Amino acid sequence: MINTAKQIAKKSNSSFYYAFKLLPPEKRDAMNTVYAFCRETDDIVDNVSASLDVKYEKLRKWRIEFEKAFSGHSEYSLLNKLGTTISKFNIPLDPFFELIRGMEMDLQKNRYLTFDDLSLYCYRVASTVGLMCIEIFGYKHKSTKEYAINLGIAFQLTNILRDINKDANDGRIYLPQEDLAKFDYSEKALMEKTYNSNFKELMEYETKRAQFYFDKANQIIQLDDKPSLFAARAMQRIYARTLDKIVAEDYNVFEKNISVLFFEKLGISIGAWAKYSLVYT
């Protein structure tokens, strides 16, 4: 049985949960519902005890139940609540279906040849979430959609860099194969967790790419949209802090546990709320 949206969001200990806490109640509830959908979709793919066929079948059924939720007839209360949330905030449906396609990519491949291949994956599993969220946050400028897309890519690239060790343990390499070749760092070296100058140069390159998307998002966001997007800005600061910590550890993600602590997340979230909700209004 699926837990309530709030329970799922809180249990995840995600940066998203802390950023949502300072939203008005109606928006906070909507964000918890959207996040819970994303989390549950991801958990279908991440279930290590299930076979590939079972995961495909569960994902197929999840998509069908999601479609039933538009009329409130899903067997899952979470999806029915999501259907109501989508209607209330007029959230486009395409990002939800694209997210499911992104999860299917995780079942279909565990390597990415080029960054173009990887960027499609990043869009589907992360930018889509941003496109859902901005409809709840509210915005005035259409360019905010591009802000969400670029920020999502930055978030996912940061996750990939932070989780290289964990993903290698699962047999996955998200870093583009063309990048490994560019820095003469082999797949075998990554799987053996070889920390050397080639790896550090590769990581510096990938970190700068993630920073490029953070910077691009910053250039796009409009001043009068910042107050309503304070939760997104809080998440942006938390992920940027993660990227900074990777650099501070000299890119040694094999031996160092890179994380932003609870009080850091809370402090960043409160700071963003104070700045954008009080100063900019």
Image (cartoon, rainbow, N blue to C red):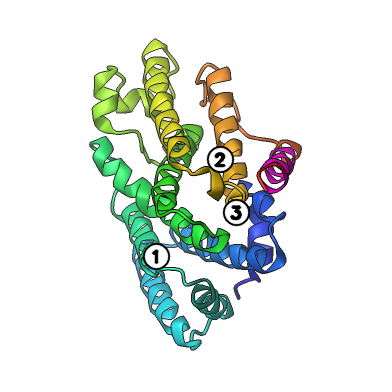
- In this view, the residue in front, 15 or 227, is 227
Residue type at mark 3?
Ser
Mark nearer the N terminus (1 vs 2): 1
| Marks 1 and 2, how far apart at CA | 31 Å
Q: Which residue is mark 3?
A: 228
Secondary structure at numbered mark 1: helix
Residue 189 location in percent, x, y?
36, 22
How packed is label 3: few (under 14 Cα within 10 Å), some, or many (20 or more)? many
Q: Which residue is mark 2?
A: 236
Query: For the point 66% across and 55% down, which residue is it?
Result: 20
Residue type at mark 1?
Lys
Mark nearer the N terminus (2 vs 3): 3
Query: For the point 35% across and 61% down, which residue is it?
Result: 98
Outermost residue toward the top in this view: 197
Q: Which residue is mark 1?
A: 55
Query: For the point 43% across and 41% down, which residue is it?
Result: 220
Residue 142 shows up from this direction: yes
Residue type at mark 2?
Gln
- In this view, the residue in front, 210 or 171, is 210
Residue 9 location in percent, x, y?
64, 59
Front of the two marks 2 and 3? 3
Q: Which residues are magenta?
A: 266-278
Secondary structure at numbered mark 2: helix
Front of the two marks 1 and 3? 3
How packed is label 1: few (under 14 Cα within 10 Å), some, or many (20 or more)? many
Seen in the picture, residue 198 relative to 275 is either above or below; the reply is above
Query: For the point 52% across and 71% down, which residue is it?
Result: 89
Mark nearer the N terminus (1 vs 3): 1
Most prominent secondary structure in the magenta stretch?
helix
